[in-house]
Image (spheres, rainbow, N blue to C red):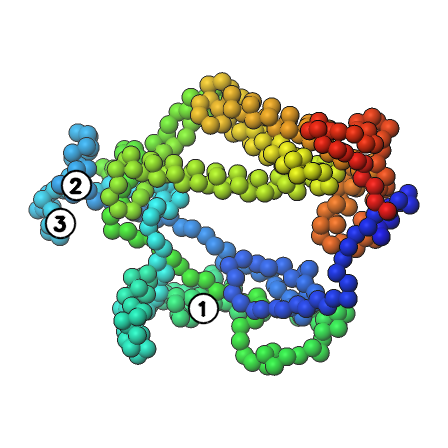
Amino acid sequence: TVSAKDGSAKEESYSCNCVTHYDYVKGWRNFRINSILFDQPGAHHNPQRDPMPSRMFTSNDATLTFREGDGAIDNVNDATNQQRTAPNNNQNNRNPTSLQTQLNPTMLASGIRNQPWRRVDFVLNGMAPSPSFFSRLFSSIFPTSWTTQNTRYEPLQLLRDTPTSRAATEDNFVYVGQGGYFFSPYESAMTSQLLNYFVQYMEGSLFDWQLGDLMPSCRAGDVRFYYEVQDPNVVSVLGEIGRNDGVANRLEIRPRVMTGSGPAASDASSVGMVHSGVRSAEEMIIAEDTDSRNMALLFRGLLVLWSIPASRLIGVAFGREVGSSSLSVQAMGAIGTFATLLGGTWVLIWGTSSSSAGIGGGRDTVLLLVMGGYFVYLTYRSSVLRGVGRRWHAVWCRIGEWANVPPEWRVEDTYVPNLSRGDQPAHGKNLMGEETYPLKRF
């Protein structure tokens, strides 16, 4: 029985006479895990160092070569004809005519579509190592060519300056190989170590030793990273060709700036695509549109799931118990919250101008907001009444209940519904024609 400040109470059920067991597994993760909420944060401390966060680098000197017969050179205007190189100007050029252009780095900001990433491994002279005995033995079942195709081998000599690099001198990074890894061991300061010992003493885990602690291994706080690269042989590019401002007599392919139809100057956008393989402009646009639609559907699906608890919290803030109402009222609350949030997002992106076309246009946005507001109103009028108190305090108490916070930390003002406003009778029918009762628990 959980009591409120005014003496009213309600019943909550919990699992009694249970023992909670915690398992801690040490492993490599590509994100930091804060250990402050662990059951034993001192014994299983995770340092929050991250000297080498994930980052994507784009090439500043990527060059494309269009050869005669590909159909691309014929589409370049007369201003680019002078960039063609004859075979007598370059003895290594076996093609009768070719055209070279530089690729603007902004074209590669989102990567190359349909091009897999390959791990970079630094080995002696850049030669792929010979397969092991077991790889040769089971080559018929597990082809060894898969590892070779998905790994790019570079000469180990390229790392000659690594010992004097900033990563090595400041964070003790060294190249350890084993798949192209760079490794930095964690070294804690004396004050940090003493503080950790004190926390372990307070939680009773200072002398809680295990056999695995005596074995030499990596420890929490160690950092390793590797490089991956996209290096296709054939790509299709959709952009604008022009002169490179930094290099004389050099052509460059860059995103084409498209002016939008809206009234704001920010409606202008750029179009620049790089896809692996041979693709037509229509195929590239359709593929990008498919990716955009799938991403929008994913976020809308997540918004639908998020709207279920959000509608209940909003109901608590306005003195309604949506979670204890009928399924139809709960569905109305979730749909209304989803439609209102999605319509508000469309307003921020496209506005309510009637010139906006397609899904998310002005008419669709207004209709979605009206539908969401109407469903929210129906939910408010049809849901079960709850105790009226401080709104944000009631919201915190509900979040604490979901998070299994002790009842002493989330004492509500009252559990008695307030019927003085005439919003809903003590017994009757709501706007959906369903029997309603005030929320009374003893």
Which mark identifies residue 93? 3
Residue 401 screen position, x and y as percent: 75, 50
Residue that appears at 75% across and 29% down: 429
Residue 406 screen position, x and y as percent: 79, 55
Give 293 or 85, whichever is nearer the viewer.
293
Give 78 or 340, whichever is nearer the viewer.
340
Is 78 rendered above or below residue 401?
above
**Residue type at tag 1:** Val
**Residue type at tag 3:** Asn
Give 369 or 384, whichever is nearer the viewer.
384
Residue that appears at 40% across and 41% down: 291
Residue that appears at 73% across and 29% down: 430
Q: Nearer the viewer, mark 2 or mark 1?
A: 2
Q: Is label 1 in a helix, a strand or a loop?
A: strand
Residue that appears at 29% across and 61% down: 149
Give 247 or 266, whichever is nearer the viewer.
266
Residue 302 is left or right of residue 42, and the answer is left
Q: Disc 2 marks which residue?
A: 70
- How far apart, in angstroms, are the residues tagged by discs 2 and 1? 45 Å
Q: Disc 1 marks which residue?
A: 174
Residue 343 screen position, x and y as percent: 56, 29
- Residue found at the very far top of the displayed protein: 354
Residue 97 is left or right of residue 310, and the answer is left
- Where is residue 260, by image quadrant? top left
> N-terminal of the two: label 2 or label 1?
2
- How far apart, in angstroms, are the residues tagged by discs 1 and 3? 40 Å
- Near mark 1 (Cα within 10 A), the count class, few <14, some 14-19 or many ≥20, is some
Is residue 198 something one can see in this rendering?
no
